[in-house]
Amino acid sequence: MAPALLNTPPLAGTDTAADTPAELVAAEPVVAEPLVPLAIRVIRSPKRHKTAAAKVLPDCIEVRVPAGMTTEAEAEMVAKLVARVERKRAAKAGPIDLADRAAKLARRYDLPLPVSITWAEQNDRWGSCTSSRGTIRISTRLARVPTWVLDAVIVHELAHLCEPNHSTAFWALANRYPRQERASGFLEAMSQGHSDPCHIV
């Protein structure tokens, strides 16, 4: 299946920075201040058999792995979980206020406000929306992309609050954001063949 964000019909003559509200324009990726690195504490838990989990504590990132896991498997699992935690930390600590940005975009393009919009660790999609609850989740991978690309994904998900599908009616709403097509190209290049950048639940 073709990526959802890549099916947008062309919008001739609208792909310019001038089409984006002044308070939302940003030509370069947002760069946040570096986070203070945290120590990593690995705990081998006899209660765990197959799964592992990581959480941020005040002084470290604690990773719990199965007691019987091999050293090699542990190292791979810890690296994966710590990278996931660090991406989420970076997104939350960054300068982007998702709720504020979504509110401005909803007002600008006459779309509904979400009940909540949060950063989430999503490796197989750029954004997701639970329309029945009015909730939106944005992949932490978008925390450092140009904000006009982030805005395209936010508008895409805001449109799903009205249309939980990829119908003609949905695209009429999503394409109110004039840089949707360019953002789709950016995400396609970024994903290198990503299978499903948008998912509705």
Image (cartoon, rainbow, N blue to C red):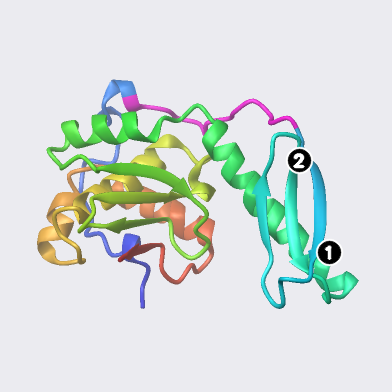
20 shown above or below 74: above
Magenta region:
24-36
Q: How many marks?
A: 2
Q: Amino acid at mark 1?
A: Ala
The magenta stretch spans residue 11 = no
The disc placed on residue 75 is 1
In the image, residue 93 lies at what x, y percent?
A: 56, 31
Viewer-nearest residue: 177 or 32: 32
- Residue annotated with mark 2: 60
Q: Secondary structure at mark 2?
A: strand
- Locate residue 14: give its quadrant: top left
Q: Amino acid at mark 2?
A: Cys
Quick check: can you spot residue 179? no
Q: Residue furthest top?
A: 23
In the image, residue 131 lies at what x, y percent?
A: 22, 57
- Measure the C-alpha gap from mark 1 to mark 2: 17 Å
Q: Secondary structure at mark 1?
A: helix
In the image, residue 1 lies at what x, y percent?
A: 36, 78
